[in-house]
Amino acid sequence: MWIFGRKGASGFSASSTAEDVTEGINGTGLTAIITGATSGIGMETTRVLALHEVHVIMAVRNTESGRSIKENILKKIPNAKVDVMELDLSSLASVRNFAAEFISSGLPLNLLINNAGVMAPPFMLSKDKIELQFATNHLGHFLLTQLLLETMKHTSHEQKTEGRIVNVSSEAHRFAYKGIYFDNLNDESSYSPIYAYGQSKLANILHAKELTRHFKENGVNLTANALHPGSIATNLLRYHNIVDGMVDWVGKYFLKNIPQGAATTCYVALHPQVKGVSGEYFMDSNIAQPNSYAKDEKLGKELWDISLTMVAP
């Protein structure tokens, strides 16, 4: 509960906003991709990064909504550099199309913010016949990251700057099945909406840690971190009308608002304190400790290998 938050080592707390944690930071010359940028913390992250002169590419399913948000940002920040591109993370073909289009643009890439997600829907399969939460929250972002790594490495080398990958995870990773149920990913009979959501969020942390291992082995100037944005009332709750109603009632007292919810994402993406930090899990703009499964190197390697197989053309 953010109202009880205290400042951590970073000087920020659960009540800090995205503008608070980026105050005085100049993002000129940086290019960022933000998935799920049409609502909630993704939209606020887009606005705040644009406010700091970062060129933001909104990677979104609904491009009409994306263009409307871009127009609203430009009204308030006339010099903002914001573009909208179509991306459906539940479709591996869409991820490949997006990456190919972005790469062909010749733009650099300094920041990849894997923010989009779906939370606890009824059992559904993606367009690739994979359980929707694992497909969208983890696998789509895994493939997107793989396809854009060379661009990020090239940008880092050319600009002599650190590239950062930011995975928006959740404290819900603690509610995953025991580890990741690789053999039962698409099993409707054993499906639990909350456990499956936790599993996908656990995968986000393991992904960042395994990326870090690869970066260190290859000596590249890239980092990868995961984070919990906080408990926030967003449209992630659209499948749960009763919960949504309770949020409306008590949310103003016990939940973060969206500017507070976007703070940790913006902190990890832009703040100088995070330079050189990789493979960590952040909460309230401070380093936190995930559960033991999220620290399991063997599980991380297994997830990496299986994910590569699942996204193979």
Image (cartoon, grey):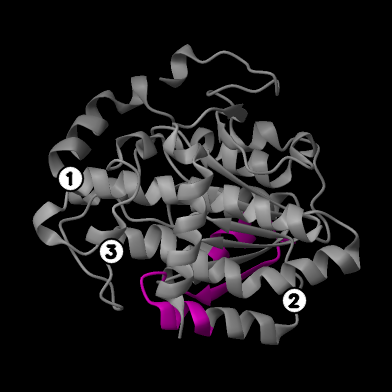
Q: Could you give the CA–CA distance between mark 2 and mark 1, rounded to whole angstroms?
A: 40 Å
Mark nearer the N terminus (2 vs 3): 2
Mark nearer the N terminus (2 vs 1): 2
Q: Name the quadrant of the C terminus.
A: bottom left
Can see residue 68?
A: no
Q: Which residues are magenta?
A: 70-97
Tag 1: amino acid: His
Tag 3: amino acid: Leu
Which residue appears farthest toward the front when viewing the image?
298
Give the side of residue 120 with respect to residue 9, left or right: left
Q: Nearer the viewer, residue 80 or 272?
A: 272
Q: Residue 9: which quarter of the image?
A: top right
Residue 260 % position (x, y): 52, 33
Q: Name the quadrant of the N terminus.
A: top left
| Residue topped by disc 1 | 240
State which mark lies toward you, 2 or 3.
3
The residue carrying pointer 3 sits among few (fewer than 14), some (14 to 19) or many (20 or more) residues within 10 Å by Cα, namely many
